[in-house]
């Protein structure tokens, strides 16, 4: 049974884009994934995104993706939304992954803008609608032009919002003006996909966030969004400002690298990375410890 959702918050408010734990030899660590999922939900998350960018989806197999969804659902699926990342730059493959995630029991789909191909807006529209038509699951778009090379235009977002199963957008565009128009015109539930902009996006109508830094500060981010929703903007702002060193420090290098480093330092399941990602250097680890300590997190 999927957790309760509303049209306003179809996947809850606080979600973590979860890393994929690996064992020392680089194979999938399903038991570790379950322990990490429980830890994150216990820390205040309404949902988890698995097989996303932070989950190293470019270097996991389709079979590993399915096994991970099933394992996380078994661990926390009765009390958290489990959203499966299925986006690729090949529509046919994305449809296969979407159907696979539905069979595995996922509660929703995260679909990133096709990358590298640089499709026109009509191509984006047809890609996303094809995915939404392929299953009965609710879809969260993922707009991240820094990785994909192509933004989803506001007009395309509005068109996509007319599809009954496209219910949300994860916004990592870094454009508050575009976000404001998209929220006002599309009717989609808007989620911040950029931790530094979690609070600013809430201020223009976002309902929550899909966070990377929630791996280390989930209770604080939960408190921030709860304070904002309750109208305590001063408290939300204080938490946001206190976490600024964390937001900065977790992205001094590629976010998966620092996230797995932080989790490993805490003794939580993470393990190594798969090439082309590499382990954090000693200098990067030292800087990460300092950044996190400046934000109140001591490793």
Image (cartoon, rainbow, N blue to C red):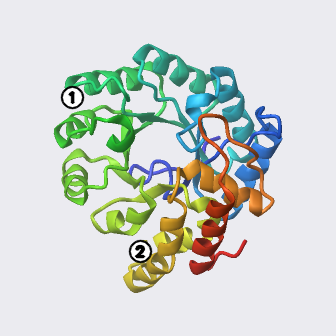
Residue 293 image position (x, y, % from top left): 63, 77
* Distance in Å between CA atoms under marks 2 and 1: 34 Å
The residue pinned by badge 2 equals 228
| Callouts 2 and 1 close, C-beta under 8 Å | no
Which of 2 and 134 lies nearest the eye of the viewer?
134
Q: Helix, strand, or loop for circle 1?
A: helix
Point 66% across, 68% down: residue: 286
Question: Quarter of the image holding residue 82?
Answer: top right
Of tags 2 and 1, the one toward the viewer is 1
Residue 252 image position (x, y, % from top left): 50, 60
Q: Which mark is residue 95?
A: none
Q: Is residue 246 left or right of residue 187?
A: right
The image quadrant where one finds the C terminus is bottom right
Q: Is residue 119 above or below residue 158?
A: above
Q: Residues within 10 Å of mark 1 (few under 14, many from 20)?
A: some
Q: Is residue 63 left or right of residue 247?
A: right
Question: Quarter of the image holding residue 275?
Answer: top right
The residue pinned by badge 1 equals 121
Question: Quarter of the image holding residue 24?
Answer: top right
Point 76% across, 46% down: residue: 271
Residue 37 visible here: yes
- Compare marks 2 and 1 and give the one earlier in the sequence: 1
Point 26% across, 22% down: residue: 123
Residue 45 image position (x, y, % from top left): 60, 59
Residue 17 visible here: no
Q: Is residue 195 above or below residue 226?
A: above
Q: Helix, strand, or loop for circle 2?
A: helix
Q: Residue furthest top?
A: 92
Q: Residues within 10 Å of mark 2 (few under 14, many from 20)?
A: some
The image quadrant where one finds the N terminus is top right
Q: Is residue 221 above or below residue 54?
A: below
Residue 155 image position (x, y, % from top left): 16, 38
């Amino acid at each position: 049974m999927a957790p309760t959702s509303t049209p306003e918050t179809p996947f809850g408010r606080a979600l973590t884009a979860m890393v994929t734990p690996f064992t020392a030899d680089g194979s999938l660590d399903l038991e570790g994934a379950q322990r990490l999922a429980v830890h994150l939900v216990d820390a205040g998350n309404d949902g988890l995104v698995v097989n996303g960018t932070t989950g190293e989806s470019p270097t996991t197999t389709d079979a590993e993706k399915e096994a991970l969804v099933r394992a996380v659902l078994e661990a926390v699926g009765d009390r958290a939304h489990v959203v499966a990342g299925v986006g690729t730059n090949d529509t046919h493959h994305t449809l296969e992954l979407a159907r696979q995630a539905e069979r595995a029991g996922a509660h929703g789909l995260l679909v990133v803008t096709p990358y590298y191909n640089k499709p026109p807006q009509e191509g984006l529209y047809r890609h996303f609608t094809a995915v939404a038509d392929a299953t009965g699951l609710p879809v969260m778009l993922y707009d991240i032009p820094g990785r994909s090379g192509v933004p989803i235009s506001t007009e395309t977002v509005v068109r996509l919002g007319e599809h009954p199963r496209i219910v949300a957008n994860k916004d990592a565009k870094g454009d508050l003006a575009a976000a404001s128009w998209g929220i006002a015109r599309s009717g989609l539930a808007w989620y911040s996909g950029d931790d530094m902009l979690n609070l600013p996006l809430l201020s223009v109508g976002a309902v929550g966030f899909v966070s990377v830094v929630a791996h280390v500060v989930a209770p604080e981010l939960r408190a921030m969004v709860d304070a904002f929703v309750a109208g305590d903007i001063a408290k939300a702002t204080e938490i946001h400002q206190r976490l600024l060193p964390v937001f900065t420090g977790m992205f001094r290098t590629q976010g998966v690298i620092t996230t797995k480093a932080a989790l490993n330092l805490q003794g939580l399941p993470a393990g190594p990375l798969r090439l082309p990602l590499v382990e954090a250097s000693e200098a990067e680890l030292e800087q990460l410890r300092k950044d996190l300590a400046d934000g109140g997190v001591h490793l």
